[in-house]
Image: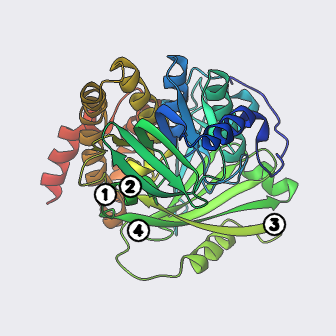
Amino acid sequence: MLCSHRVEKSHRGCWYNLDHSLLASYFINMSINQIPHYDVAIVGAGPAGALAAYEVAKAGLRCVILEKECLPRYKVCGGGLIYKARKALDIDICAAIERELSVTKIALFGSAKTYSTPPQDKPMVTMVMRDKFDQLLVKAACDHGAELLEAFALKALQVNGDDVHLTDASGRKVSAKMVIGADGANSAVGRLGGWGHFEAVAPALECELTVSDADMVRFSGTARFDLDIPKDGYGWVFPKGQHLSIGVGRFFNKERINLHQTLDAYLAHLGLQAYADKTVHGFVIPLHPRKEGVILGRLFLVGDAAGFADPVLGEGLSSAILSGIAVGKAIVASDMDLARAQAGYQRYVDEEVLADLATARKLASFCYLSPTMRNWLLAKSSERLITAMTKIIMGDSHYIDYQMRFMNKLKFWG
């Protein structure tokens, strides 16, 4: 284990200590009819935005994070940080860790059959609550000079020559040479910047449950995934410090179902009946990158705003982290030259993201739409398949590394 931390529940409210200087300078500037100007403005204070800000602030560029809420704030997310992304961080996240797990368990709904990954010497999945995790990453960026402007709900975006002007619902304005949209699946930067709707999204529900001590012990040792509930998706159980995060998600939506009833059926399947604090949150996961690309002029999209979530795992935290770091480094390496920044980030997207996601979408289609064949293959080649998935989660390989073998099998089955 890398860390052993118990994390107390954080309070709600605005994170005023990080942006006093920004607010003061903002109102002074506005008093003389000037708009605060930055090299880079990042919309969204999640991991993608915080890490993009961290990279550019470390290099001495002036940047601001625009967040529509006040930190810390609850964020709907499974909170499972896979090692592939964790090892890319050079920020100490121990204070935000709820639990570290070296084993992942896959169960088949309606069957007693389960598969477990071999124990790893590093945490395969690190459990975090996003309020604490996001706040920690934003603080790291602010410690290097990034500024944070909270309660900034983006309502207008206008490119004026070499600058982009951003205006919130109350009329506050900032401008920047480049803008990073890190504001999730319902990205305001995407909507206002000229992107269309996503081709496909996966609906999901999640709840945080306080359960009995016995149930907490029962689920505390592994990240659990139950395939086929719903039948074109999966359910998950993620143990946190003192509670369970449980949810269900669909990936193809071939039939209309009530996800709330599916979640209740999943809780019953898990044998969870005595629990407290059940509040259900809904969200969507984009399953396909933006068809227009992820760069439009001075605007860059990252994470879920770009549609980079893993279509097999339905997991977007790692792509948010990796793309946030990538766009930040591309801008730094460009010396604020727009064409060079665009080329650097596009190179990352082309080489590290798009081909791998294309392979993953084919695998997801087979996994969730051909359950009988998938289960047969699991029974026949479980060790090889579990080993391959373990390597992907640990960041030792990619989906595309298995493309030829996978495509050959598809031709055989076809």
Q: Which residue is mark 3?
A: 277
Instruction: Using residue 152 as the reference point, say whether residue 292 is left or right of it.
Output: left
Q: Secondary structure at mark 4?
A: loop
State the image quarter where residue 236 is shown.
Answer: bottom right
State if disc 3 and disc 1 touch (CB < 8 Å).
Answer: no
Q: Could you tell me the amino acid type at mark 4?
A: Asp
Which disc number belongs to residue 195? 1
Which quadrant: the N terminus? top right
**Which comes sooner in the sequence, label 4 or label 3?**
4
Q: Are marks 2 and 3 in contact (CB under 8 Å)?
A: no
- The residue that disc 2 covers is 190
Q: Which mark is residue 150?
A: none
* Mark pair 1, 2: CA separation: 5 Å
From mark 4 to mark 2, how far is it between C-alphas?
A: 28 Å
Sequence-wise first label, 4 or 2: 2
Kind of element beneath mark 2: helix
Q: Is residue 273 left or right of residue 284?
A: right
Q: Secondary structure at mark 1?
A: loop
Which sits earlier in the primary sequence, circle 1 or circle 4? Answer: 1
Out of 177 and 413, give the one closest to the viewer.
177
Percent x, y of residue 148: 64, 38
The Cα atoms of the two marked residues, 2 and 3, are separated by 35 Å
The three-letter amino acid code for the residue at tag 3 is Asp
User: Which residue matches tag 4?
Assistant: 232
